Amino acid sequence: MTDSFIETIQKSKNSASGNAVHSTVLSCYETPLVTVDIVLCTVIQNQLKVLLIQRKQPPYEHMWAIPGGFIHVGETLEQAASRRLLEETNVNNIYLEQLGSFGQPDRDPRARVITVAYYALVSAEKLHLQAHANAEDVKWFSVSELPELAFDHHEIVQMALAKLKRHLESSSVAFQLLPEKFTLTELQRVYELVLGKPLDKRNFRKKILASDILKDTGETKMEGYHRPAQLYAFTRRSPVTQAS
């Protein structure tokens, strides 16, 4: 959204507030603008990565940011998040979960803007990235090597990663970062990348196999020079929460 568009909205509000028909108690209050932002993560080349766009317009022109934008009247927050993700990156039809809201008064230099952030996980093999809308470029960045981000997007990304770690330990959300069939080694690696620490192989396999979120496919896959590894699949392709 351009500065001129924001100015048009603000002028429209001022005009409405001065109209006797709209002169209500609510018209005495400032109306902030609302946006949605999306933290999208995947695993590529054995690294946990987050999707960023390079901004085409001010503020923060040419800087990297997470995908997002202003909502339209008549659409839900989820619809707005899905639309902006598609418009800016060509990513569509993925599971989005609300992360939280961010509303520091000075987070956007153009106007008072509150954003509702979402985060999502997706297998890299499902993606066909392409920059659209107000994005000059779209690119994956390792979570350990992020560039300086526009607005408060660094804070949003860090909160998403923290929530992902908590979610990973209590649900089957990891399925979204894996192909339909995978080995226990591949699954463990996803857990290690998200948690940022190595896991004991024996304990991990004992715990994950006892969780009832996996099923044996009866198929195998070669891993290096070792004997074929068993392929598993999640019992449900949805982020099922495990019992504590």
Image: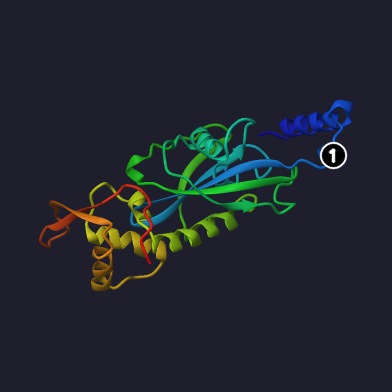
Q: Tell me if residue 228 comes above or below residue 112 in the rendering.
A: below
Does the rendering let one see residue 4? yes
Secondary structure of the residue carrying tag 1 is helix
Residue furthest toward the left? 227
- Its colouring scheme is rainbow
Which residue has dot 1 on it?
A: 25
- Foreground pick, 3 / 139: 3
- Foreground pick, 134 / 25: 25
Q: Position of residue 91 (x, y in %)?
A: 44, 37
In the figure, residue 229 lies in which quadrant? Answer: bottom left
Q: Position of residue 5 (x, y in %)?
A: 72, 30
In the rendered view of the protein, which quadrant contains the N terminus?
top right
In the figure, residue 34 lies in which quadrant? Answer: top right
Residue 224 located left or right of residue 188: left
Residue at image location 24% in from the left, 67% down from the top: 205
Residue at image location 60% in from the left, 39% down from the top: 69
- Foreground pick, 104 / 147: 104
Residue 199 located left or right of residue 32: left
Q: Tell me if residue 37 comes above or below residue 198 in the rendering.
A: above
Residue 164 located left or right of residue 70: left
Does the rendering let one see residue 145? no
Q: Tell me if residue 56 comes above or below residue 221 in the rendering.
A: above
Residue 105 located left or right of residue 123: right
In the figure, residue 95 lies in which quadrant? Answer: top left
Q: Position of residue 29 (x, y in %)?
A: 82, 42
